[in-house]
Amino acid sequence: MDSKKDLTKELLADCFHELLLTMPFDKITIKTITDRAGLIRPTFYKHFQDKYEVLEWIFQTDISDGTRTLIQNGRAYDAVVLLVKGLEKDKDFYRKALTIDGPNSFLEILKKDVYASFLKIAGLYSVKIKETIPILTDARIASFYTNGLVSTIYDWLKSGCYCSADDLCRAYHYLMMHSAVDLIS
């Protein structure tokens, strides 16, 4: 039974994915998704609350689940690489997703996910910093790094990916390993 349920959920997500590539998000309705899938509307609601949840599920299953696994295994930089390469792999979809506005937008989903990742990393590695600079809480550290990474990804995706994911990751890694003072001296 679960495999049929999973297949139906994937079908709905695939149909939403296809629709977002061909039409504006605000024109996509639950009916257009279920019609494309050959299902009835109540079936949609057995799997998703709304189309925002479909978007979040796609991002979670395509990218986020893998980044969390890497972070749990102490491979934070690899998680960033997976995130950026995953976005690049489906850049047309994620560029369209960035056009969605509001509190459930893709940008907010991305921020929430990246923040949770950096919060986990900060909790694992920031003990010494918190002892010497108490205002640098896990939340403040996570917020700082989230803003930098999400802003970089946003600009990169919106521009049509002005460089490869590998180049972006190398640049991001360089910036993470060097202070602003290093850059100007």
Image (tube, grey):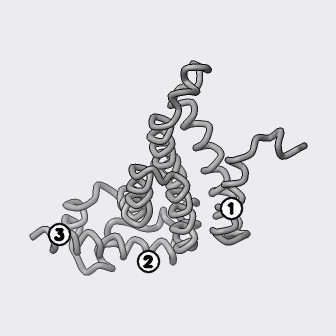
Q: Position of residue 12 (x, y in %)?
A: 30, 71
The quarter of the displayed image where residue 11 is located? bottom left
Q: Quadrant of the N terminus?
A: bottom left
Q: Secondary structure under badge 2? A: helix
Q: Given the image, on which type of amino acid does mark 3 rest? A: Lys
Does 68 sit left or right of 129 as displayed? left
* Disc 1 and disc 2 in contact, CB within 8 angstroms: no
Residue at (55, 55) in percent of width and height: 77
Q: Nearer the viewer, mark 1 or mark 3?
A: 1
Residue under circle 3? 5
Pointer 2: residues within 10 angstroms few (<14), some, or many (20+)?
A: some
Q: Position of residue 136 (x, y in %)?
A: 58, 25
Does 31 sit left or right of 129 as displayed? left
Q: Earlier in the sequence, mark 1 or mark 3?
A: 3
Q: Nearer the viewer, mark 1 or mark 2?
A: 1
Residue 51 visible to an observer of this rendering: no
Q: Earlier in the sequence, mark 3 or mark 2?
A: 3
Q: Earlier in the sequence, mark 1 or mark 2?
A: 2
* Depicted 144 relative to depicted 47: above or below: above
Residue under circle 2? 18
Residue 138 visible to an observer of this rendering: yes
* Disc 1 and disc 3 in contact, CB within 8 angstroms: no
* Depicted 180 relative to depicted 136: above or below: below
Residue under circle 1? 170
Q: CA distance from mark 1 to mark 3?
A: 40 Å
Q: Secondary structure under badge 3? A: helix
Q: Given the image, on which type of amino acid does mark 1 rest? A: Arg
